[in-house]
Image (spheres, rainbow, N blue to C red):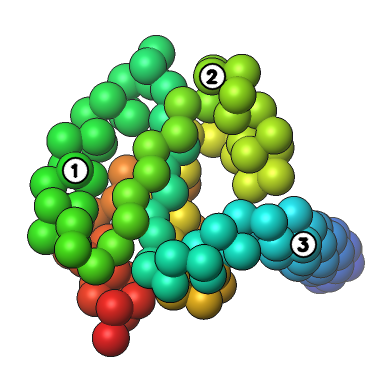
Amino acid sequence: MNRDKIMICLFIAMAIGIFFYFQFAQENKNLIESLAPFRKTIMAVKRPRVVNFTAKWCAPCQQFKPILKKVMMNYSQSVDYESIDIDDKGNKDLVRSFSVKSIPATYVFDRQGNLIFKHIGYIDPEELDYYLRKTIL
């Protein structure tokens, strides 16, 4: 009897895992397709870009902002940085095309406009530095 319950639980867990795997794959495909115009602007200037989605009311965003700015100062000559307020009406289409659901959300693009790193929440400065170095090499 216990073995049957365990097998049923494992089956359910596997089904849930498969569902979320395909859900994530579809979200990534949609993100890549919706970012085509954004990629063109990056490719036009041929510089890597960091895009950070934030809001004035978001306490974690406000705590992360000075850390991000400090890291970005080291790359000001080689990487473009853009902070986007999700509450600004002019940014609604961009927020939607990036499928931003949680903030802070940070995206790193290489000079061809390819998304190489996406992170939701606080990023360790060393981890961000690693991906920035990777984009400029």
Q: Is residue 69 above or below residue 78?
A: above
Residue 116 appears anywhere in the view: no
Q: Nearer the viewer, residue 36 or 4?
A: 36
In primary-sequence order, the first of circles 3 and 2 is 3
Q: Image quarter for residue 29?
A: bottom right
**Distance of mark 3 from mark 1, alpha carbons?**
29 Å
Q: At 12% from the left edge and 47% from the top edge, which residue is drawn?
A: 70
Question: Residue 83 lies in what quarter of the image?
Answer: top left
Instruction: Measure how far apart labels 3 and 2 are at the Cα level.
Output: 23 Å
Identify the disc placed on residue 33. 3
Number of marks present in the image shown: 3
| Element at label 1 | helix
- The amino acid beneath tag 3 is Glu
Q: Which mark is residue 112?
A: none
Q: Which residue is mark 2?
A: 88
Residue 119 left/right relative to 102: left
Which label sits on residue 69?
1
